[in-house]
Amino acid sequence: MSESPAATIHHGPKHQYHLVDPSPWPLVGAACAGALAVGGVLYMHGHGTTLLIIAFVAVLAMMAAWWRDVIKEATFQGHHTPVVQIGMRYGMALFIASEVMFFAAFFWAFFSAALFPTEATGGVWPPKGIHPFDPWEFPFLNTLILLTSGTTVTWAHHALLEDVRKGLKYGLILTVLLGAAFTCVQAYEYAHAAFSLAHSVALIVGPQE
């Protein structure tokens, strides 16, 4: 005997919000991120890369599984109602705002130290003994890569709005490749820097007895 429409309405959700099912991914993600941090510290102290590599692969697998569940909720189960979509947009906007504040703090600290050098830096900027990179070499190249990745992701976004799947796919692929290139250039730059964070602290603090 089939249920009446009234019974169906009674058992269905009475709101437009999506109550997320219990998920293991926040706990698994925290464990993987913690292992990645520990692996990074062990690598910096010369204990090999085994844990670092395993944790990095685990983080990638966790991200793929979590995103798969979110895509399934939105595309196949239809849980992402207009109200839920608005909440997600606000969440992304707040995330971007937090990133802006994060970088603003770094730039504030940089310009404060560069424009008003203190005794801690020897009264000059860059501090004595620090030889920075030429800004027109790797920093300039990485800036171009970063700006270009912003262009390709904008292309993918507009292709998505126009339902042009081919443009969306190519735009996202180029964005991922440019992001990987940016990360590689950054890693090369840090590996070939004439000084390290420990060296900078030692210059500022001075020799310890």
Image (tube, rainbow, N blue to C red):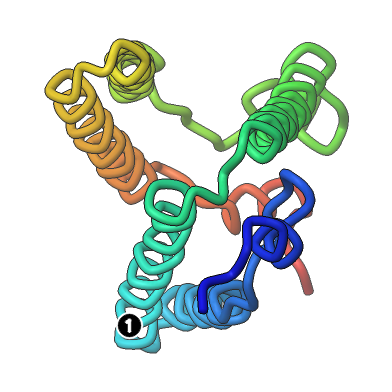
As shown in the figure, which amino acid type bears the numbered disc 1?
A: Ile
Residue at 51% in and 79% down: 1
Nearest to the observer: residue 82 or residue 47:
82
Neighbours of disc 1 within 10 Å: few (<14), some (14-19), many (20+)? some
Quarter of the image for residue 170 reads top left
Residue 191 percent across, percent down from the top left: 33, 50
Residue at 62% in and 80% down: 27
Nearest to the observer: residue 142 or residue 70:
70
Residue 113 percent across, percent down from the top left: 78, 24
Residue 181 percent across, percent down from the top left: 23, 36
Numbered disc total: 1
Quarter of the image for residue 171 reads top left
Dot 1 falls on a residue whose secondary structure is helix
Nearest to the observer: residue 132 or residue 75:
75
Residue at 47% in and 48% down: 74
Query: Quick check: 74 left or right of 185?
Result: right
Query: Quick check: 60 left or right of 14?
Result: left
Query: Quick check: 174 left or right of 6?
Result: left
Q: Which residue is mark 1?
A: 54
Nearest to the observer: residue 153 or residue 196:
153
Position of the C terminus, as image quadrant, is: bottom right
Residue at 70% in and 34% down: 83
Q: Is residue 166 above or below residue 88?
A: above
Q: Is residue 90 visible?
A: yes
Q: Is residue 106 visible?
A: no
Residue 75 percent across, percent down from the top left: 39, 47
Q: Is residue 20 above or below residue 105?
A: below
